[in-house]
Image (tube, coloured by chain):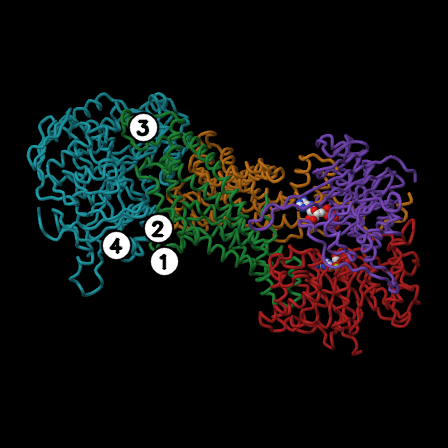
Amino acid sequence: SSGGGSGNGTPAASNGGTTTGAPQKDQMVIAVNENFITMDPQNTGDALSSGVQSAMFEGLLIYDKDLKLMPGLSTEYSVNEDATEYTFKLRQNVKFHDGTPFNAEGVKINFDRMSNKDNNLRAYRNYKYIKSTEVVDEHTVKVTLNQPFSAMINKFTTGIISPAALEKYGKDITKNPVGTGPYKFVEWVQGDHLTVELNPDHWNKGAAKVGKIVYKPVPENGSRVAMLKTGEADVIYPLPEQQVETLNGAEGVKVERTPSTITRYVSINMLKKPFDDPRVRQAINHAVDKDAFIKVVKAGYGTQLESVMSPTIAHYSKQGVYEYNIEKAKKLLKEAGYENGFTTDIWGNTNSDTMKGMQFIQQQLKQVGITVEVKSMEEATLSDEIYGIKSPEEAKMNMWYVSWSSADPDNAMRSLFSSENFPPAGANTAFYKNDRVDQSIKEATQSSDQDKQKQLYGVVQENVFKDAPWIFLAVDEILYGKRANVNGVYITPSGGIYVREAAFQ
Amino acid sequence: MVMSKSLVVVDGIKKTFPIDSGLLSSKKSVKAVNHVSFDIKEGETFSLVGESGCGKSTTGRLVTRLLMPDEGKIWINGEEISKMNETKLREVRKQVQMVFQDPYASLNPRMKIRDVVAEPLLIHTKLSAQERDRIVAEMLEVVGLSSYHAEKFAHEFSGGQRQRIGIARALILKPKLIVADEPVSALDVSIQSQILNLLKDLQEEFHLTYLFISHDLSVVEHISDKIGVMYLGSLVESGPKEMIFANPRHPYTKALLSSVPIPDPRAKRERIILQGDVPSPVNPPSGCLFHTRCPFVMDICKSTPPALREAADRDHFVACHL
Amino acid sequence: MEVVKEIGHSAVVPTEKKSRAREFWKKWKKQKTAFWAGFFILFLFVIALFGPWIAPYDPYEPNYDVTLQTPSMEYWAGTDEYGRDILSRIIVGTGISLGVSFSSVLVGAVVGTILGLISGYYGGWMDRLIMRWSDVMFAFPDLLLAIAIVAILGPGLTNVVVAVAVFSIPSFARLIRGNTLAAKEAVFVEAARSMGAKSSRIIFRHIFPETVSSMIVFFSMRIGTSILAASSLSFLGLGAAPESPDWGAMLSMGRDYLATSPHVVIIPGIAIFLTVLAFNLVGDGLRDILDPKTKN
Amino acid sequence: MFRYIVKRLIEIIPIIFVVSLLIFFFIHLVPGDPVRLAAGKEATLEEIERVRQELGLDKPLHTQYVNYMQNLLTGNLGHSLKTGLPISDMFENRFSVTMTLTFMSLGWALVLGLLIGTISAVFRNKWPDYVGMLTAISGISLPGFWLGLILIQIFSVTLGWFPTGGVESWKSYVLPSLTLGAGIMSMLARFTRSSLLETLKEDFIRTGRAKGLKESVVVRKHALKNSMIPVVTIAGLQFGFLLGGSVVVETVFSIPGMGRLLIDSIAFRDYPVVQAVILLFSLEFILVNLLVDILYKALNPKIRYDS
Amino acid sequence: MSENIMEVKHLQTQFTRDNQKTVVLDHVSFHIKKGEVLGLVGESGCGKSVTSLSIMRLFKDTTGEITNGEIVYNGTNLLSISESDMRRIRGKEISMIFQEPMTSLNPVMKIGEQLMEAIRLHLGYSDQKAREQAVSMLTKVGIPRPSEIMGEYPHQLSGGMRQRIMIAMAMSCNPNLLIADEPTTALDVTIQAQILDVMKQLQADEHMSMLLITHDLGVVAEMCNRVVVMYAGRVVEEASVYDLFDEPKHPYTKGLIGSVPKIGQKRARLDSVPGNVPTPNNMPKGCKFAPRCKDVMPVCWEKEPVITTVGEERFCRCWLYQEEGRDGHV
Ligand SMILES: Nc1ncnc2c1ncn2[C@@H]1O[C@H](COP(=O)(O)OP(=O)(O)OP(=O)(O)O)[C@@H](O)[C@H]1O
Ligand SMILES: Nc1ncnc2c1ncn2[C@@H]1O[C@H](COP(=O)(O)OP(=O)(O)OP(=O)(O)O)[C@@H](O)[C@H]1O
Ligand SMILES: [Mg+2]
Ligand SMILES: [Mg+2]
């Protein structure tokens, strides 16, 4: 039990000393585009909620601003050869915001919560591999999996909740988050804002300096930009590509860009004619000008997609691009027997960006004689149409304009290309099936050897790229704006909001 | 004039309109027509006179079954119509047509006169368009308009002409009974006389029976055979025209008669100027309805309503304690 | 006949027999602003019919070299994010925007009017039923309704007309009901009843014309709303294909460019504005003409 | 009148019942699966089934309805499928925000609408009329997001008078209420104009002038109140719409109101929330209608409280 | 001529319809003596109301305008003074009662307020005093429960009561001239009798001049000293009330008097003036009455007669009483 001023440091007190010059700013407003859904890190599905949670919660490991794993609540760990046993040394002298000490028992309670299917938590999907969690000593836990799963290490980033708070709030923990992070929860006004304040007892005290952070959902792009200009917001994310120009040169404002984990592509239903013919799929890839795509649809922000995932993700292996070549595309189509093209359709949601992208594809494919009907659908209906099918043969989808964001190679590849993940069971919406790919993914999951993983994932990327179950389009760039005096706030490639070093100049 | 059987027999009809007035007050009602009886012989003109709101129009609308009486019975041409259903009623309405007080309001402003006049034909007959046009043209001639007026709209006519149109429409099915609700009240004297003359001529020509409603006694005198005087929903005096005018029995009739301005500056006469306004039909006075304004009021009048009884002359009825 | 002789004809009434259309035309010409506004709408209809032949460029043809150009001699209204000529898109889009909004409001007006007439004329439980139904419709979110319509009817221009019409029905029903309540009391309605006319005749021949003028005014106000509504439906996959140059869709898609290339939004905005203005002016003019009291 | 109000209030009960029934079955017919959306793209079938059971969405529809009604009758609106929060919690803040916005929008729409309408009528067919009516028609044909963003650009970014959004103080409400009120203002202006023009033709206006009253007094004291009667009906209808919140304005000005809640909930097929919101809106609509009828009668001494 | 409170000279008023000017009053001239009641009679649409509106200059919101003539009131030409001067005269010196008692009162304003409005304005009374004055006016016109009625709305009153309110309103500032435009046309006979009685009383008490517009010859006979008969926007005859009824000159006047049904006078048919008043757009070229005239002569179709003296203080516009070229004012 430690002494030291416990939790009475009001924001005003923290800048008590400085009386000179302009009043020191101590509150940072971060405007984002959507509402947060939940503050239970173990039951979160959306990037934004977890982005906000990262201020309050920490996992045994944490991602840094470049998506590298670094020690969080554990100081070191070890894995056995076939990736079934993980042992963590926990950080000492850490306390939850409610004063509960952090220890192995607490970790076990959290892991047991997630791995129990009756709790119906989002995290169960990852933690179902855990057979048991053992408290080795006060500061050591050992996790045993029921099958080899190399990607498990990435999942230990899930935030750890105070066991006392879990006990106290039960399901209501979503409204009352209590973690160990550099900021602690103050209030969440539904739909309006969520406020956190500096945690004076954080183990990494001093890294974050801003006294208070207010997260605000501001759905309108133009309004977010306006808020940054007026100084009502210190950081805005996302910054719409089309608006970057208005901020360039604006006083006191900085535009930041980072490559993201988001891949943009068109998923092609390989079970359907004429897409069952690889030449057709390749032809389509050749028919689309990716540079123009980035210019027109992404206002120039983004890079061509040169593999099946973003270069920010581990074990990335660059494959190049299907060069933009109408003649080649036409030739391939002719070989496949579609000299005069064909008619098909493309689906997508109702976002204006998606609509723009779909129309672009339509325009491009028209050049090779393919008539594409653009069908935008309201998200839930779309999801019903795509995933709500009984069997893969039932799928009505031809092409789907979509994006995927993942933090690790397993998630980037197994979910999308493993044949066991055909809808309705998973997200392999191209119905891609390649035995070598299936095999490689499986092997990669079962080995903790990084080199082996790299090689196996390389095989997957190469094969998928060649088979072209997608139209490979682009990797998004993360664009965000901040006031010039904001330091140490980053948007991570996966869209997380990294505030562990937040400070004003 | 040949006296013949009664075309209209009205027996004790009553009509009450519910109104719910004011804050938190209980339901009230207007006794618009209270136990009115009369009969009209074929070819005869029966006039109802009385002040505004005394129930003349309501009586007229009951006779045409535009309203359903609460009590009492009405026979038209021997058929009891007071409880008849709408389909059968439509047949009766061939025989009974109405002429309204405000000729402009009663003509659809958006219809050509030809269509206005032809409407009863459309409703009740299956004539061809040419046939209809021919009959309309004929009818317009009868009322003193010409067929080229048929192409115009109501607003393009003067008041007198409009009333002629209304009459043409009422006549086109050759009905037996015409209920004329203040047909000349809205017209100028010179036009009024044209219409009155026309109505008289038509009555002769087509052997019409009129229920004539008016508040102008001089007009009524000119056109009627029999007269009924109404006050606050009740018939207070009725009888042949000559008797009513020569020998009015009810003080109200007397006042009414004396109120008519005489177009002669030298005429000197004793005016009976009634005091006060017509009482509200929502709260009618007790006893004799007229006692609040009657110059000859007696004690009995305040408590007991007088019954309608035959006066000295035959066919002359009056409801007064005097 | 004696009667006729006495009364005689006034020799001063003009003898010209006017046809309805000519009469209307004569009055219409006198309504200066409405006349020109009507002319403009006519012009729009012509454009709607012949748009594809008039348009200087192919409205669907992208040109990635000239995206988001401001208006110039070459592109009078500038270009959009794909480098398509905005003027050509406006011209070709006239048909879709005008067609959909006009016909949907028309359908809404027809159905709403019938409901309003029935509700107002018959009163009683029928009235209550219709009015409470319209309360619910008012409270019901358009989005949900639209999603359901897409699901039930599928996409297509006709269905977008149906959807937008459905949104308009309750308002029209309300409006017409109010007018019906007033018109029902008119003496000429009573006159028709006294002649033995059936309810259907009274409603359609006598009461309905009385409600037309306010219907027209409301109609003209709904045009703009429904252009925008139709485009938001096309986002849900109902109605015009996303690439088609529907004005409302151009406006909504241009949203992101409001700050950088405002002409992308302003030009369709102006097109909508002028159309709504014209319809309103024509509505006002028509009301004046149809009102028998302002004749003469 | 008291009786009339009571009668109308009693009428609400069956209506709400029918409405709830309608909504319930209607939204379950709409395609889209909240479980699928809740579970996410990577969810396995087994996972989905578990979530479905937990949310009680596996039961037959009529059972679900009975449960729902039972909860409703005990005043329990249920929990959101999306956030798991009690719906009453989600309403709390949003409802008052929407109310404030509604009243402010209506307030200035009334003031400006009446003003413009009156000026237009008084200066009929002169330039103030043209300007007024052009303003009104712009208000109808300008899309809300456009007006909103322009106002933000002018008054927040350039002039810095008002915040770009939020609900911190009365200042935050100024721009959104202007945006939201624009359409209503236009309607009111047009209706006021035509109604006033009618009234100005009335005989009693001439009486006022014959008394020697100034024209401004005639318009203000005699014409305006009479013209208000039809305007109130329109205002009432619009008021109902406003209470439903406006998605566009709430989006542009980042206002946590009912409109966005509804839209978000529909997108997520968050059945309990959607049901609760629509039910609330229906109730509001019916109450506003009642209020309008009462106000209407208060304005017009001629109207009786029957039927 | 100082005994004349008002002289109307060659008044010409026109309306514009469909961009077409229609002259509704043409060379209307007459005078009103102090303390007399002048009757103005004629068929509907002949211009009686327009005459009264012209005197009050109440053409706002209509297309009406006075294009010629003079209206001299107590030596001032009302057509040449400013609008604000005119406002001071309206309601104070010259008051008006309108044709329609049912619509001439503001339906949403309490009776009291409508009455007090003018009193406060013209007499500068305080609320209290204005109220007293209003109540006393109501009493004068025979309204029962005057102070209660002050708090009621017009629709709560009967037509007769409303017309009495209108009279009270018009009289409340003790005007010198009262213009009553068909004050009883909309009322029942018994109520009409009451109202006429009240008006006669007040007129005599206050020694007020009055212009009484009506088409009811009975009312004229009872109320007026002198009568002006109008037809189609022109004065066709002017005479004392006795002369007019004893010996009407103009064929129109004759027809008018003949067409009134009189009680006790048994006639199978009424006399009547055939035809209709010509509409302003279809005026015959010569005498406007020619198409309906029993005694029409060829000259009548050709040229409009001028108004000529046909006796002491008697004028008539008819070819029967003038030779072509004889003087007279147009
Ligand atoms: N539909 C109705 N609802 C309520 N009250 C009514 C209705 N019709 C008539 N009344 C009332 O019934 C009474 C008699 O009205 P009615 O119209 O029959 O009078 P009237 O003698 O024709 O009067 P007028 O000379 O003014 O036409 C009046 O008090 C009137 O207010
Ligand atoms: N506001 C107006 N606009 C156009 N024409 C008008 C207007 N007021 C009156 N007139 C016309 O002026 C002429 C005279 O009308 P006026 O009202 O003076 O008749 P009147 O003698 O008072 O008739 P009534 O006995 O019906 O009151 C009529 O032809 C009428 O149509
Ligand atoms: Mg009547
Ligand atoms: Mg008049």
Q: Amino acid at mark 3?
A: Arg
Q: CA distance from mark 1 to mark 3?
A: 46 Å
Chain B pictured colour: purple
Give the residue displayed 28% in from the left and 53% down from the top.
Answer: A233
Q: Are the residues flagged by discs 4 and 1 in contact, CB closer than 8 Å?
A: no
Q: CA distance from mark 2 to mark 3?
A: 38 Å
Residue A223's disc number: 2
Q: Which residue is mark 4?
A: A483
- The vertical placement of C215 against E85, above or below, is above
Left or right: E319 in relation to B280:
right
The three-letter code of the residue at mark 2 reads: Ser
Colour in which chain E is drawn: red
Chain appearing in green on the rendered image:
D
Same chain, marks 3 and 4?
no
Give the drawing colour for chain A: cyan
Q: Are marks 2 and 1 in contact (CB under 8 Å)?
A: no
Q: Position of residue D81 (x, y in %)?
A: 33, 35
Q: Residues within 10 Å of mark 4 (few under 14, many from 20)?
A: many
